[in-house]
Amino acid sequence: MHRFILSKVIGMLAVLAIVAVLVFVLTRAASGDPVSVLLGDQATAEDIVRVKKDYGLDKPLPVQFGYWLREVVRGNLGQSIFLQRPVTQALWERAEPTTLLSLMAVAIAACIGVPCGIVSAVYRGSFVDQLFTGVAMLGASIPSFWLGIVLIQLFAVSLGWFPVSGYGPPDAALPERLHALMLPAFVLGTLNSALIIRFTRASMLDVLGEDYVRTARSKGLPESTVVLKHALRNALVPIVTVIGLTVALMIGGAVVTETVFGLPGVGNLVVSAVLRRDYPVIQGALLVIAGIYVLINFSIDMLYALIDPRVKF
């Protein structure tokens, strides 16, 4: 157990180190200069040199990376060039919309994907199976921005059931904020349910042909008990895996949805930072998202032994 956790922690640190190097190199390799964007076209060469010196951008890249990595180890993600406040504070201020959006979307995706996958596997080859399989393929191919625009036009503009964009006023209560997140959460959840449907169906098909399932049926147990208690429980490991990965993907992949719906989340912050070449915000946000991703993977690995006693660390 302890060796398993230690190996996982070492692997997580290695992944984060690789992500840190890649993020730093790719942000610097992109065209554009944050100082030029910050000062505008009227800035003189002296002004540009002075501001670069203030932010340490005049130093060689290995030195800049060393300074940034040292501060990251201390828990400091740096200072935003444009926002003029710590990156940690900027991310914390934008964390609530992204977190609520991701959790709501995962709940919707699981509520759609798992039951549809189970029914599709139980009635394999039937019209219902073909319908749910087609829905899964359709959901995997629809662009999120297109579906978001269609839903805004239908439910926000035409019917007026939801706000067109935004997250509510600053003093809005939690129910009002959740109401504003319903449409974007439905977009993310519906599209990501396609992957859960396919994984659930495949996992259930593998289990439904096992001997213990046939034995349970031969004992005269109700079909619902056979499917939900005997088959589903043994098929949960890959299903939980894909749901956990969906959570991580939604946290890092809500950029388009947040932009379409005008949500002040982390995704919108990253888009603005990329357009401004705000290196500290880009690096900090991507590193945090990578950290959340590896933590979710670690949590999934720990859940395996609880879900299925046959799994050993």
Image (cartoon, helix red, strand yellow):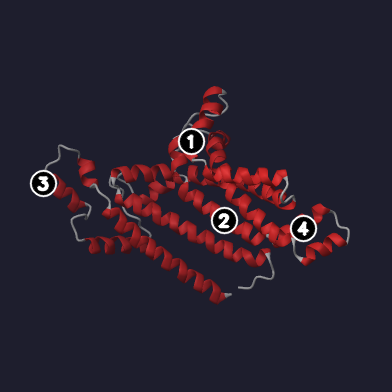
Disc 3 crowd, CA 10 A, few/some/many (<14, 14-19, 20+): few
Identify which residue is drawn at 63% across, 65% down.
304
Q: Residue 60 shows which numbered tag?
A: none
Q: Which badge, 3 or 1, comes first in the chain's sequence?
A: 3
Could you tell me the amino acid type at mark 3?
Answer: Glu
Disc 2 crowd, CA 10 A, few/some/many (<14, 14-19, 20+): some
Task: Say left or right for 8 vs 79.
Answer: right
Residue position marked by numbered label 1 in the rendering: 146
Identify which residue is drawn at 51% across, 27% down.
153
Could you give the CA–CA distance between mark 3 and mark 2, rounded to whole angstroms?
51 Å
Identify which residue is drawn at 57% across, 34% down.
179
From the top left corner, tell me how far across and down residue 259 is, in percent. Answer: 43, 38
**Closer to the eye: label 2 or 1:** 1
Residue position marked by numbered label 3 in the rendering: 46
**Closer to the eye: label 3 or 2:** 2
Q: Which badge, 4 or 3, comes first in the chain's sequence?
A: 3
Identify which residue is drawn at 19% across, 51% down.
52
Task: Say left or right for 199 vs 20.
Answer: right
Residue position marked by numbered label 4 in the rendering: 229
Could you give the CA–CA distance between mark 1 and mark 4, rounded to whole angstroms?
39 Å
Could you tell me the amino acid type at mark 2?
Answer: Gly
Mark 1: secondary structure: helix
Residue position marked by numbered label 2 in the rendering: 244
Task: Say left or right for 147 vs 41.
Answer: right
Could you tell me the amino acid type at mark 1?
Answer: Trp
Q: Which badge, 2 or 1, comes first in the chain's sequence?
A: 1
Mark 3: secondary structure: helix
Mark 4: secondary structure: helix
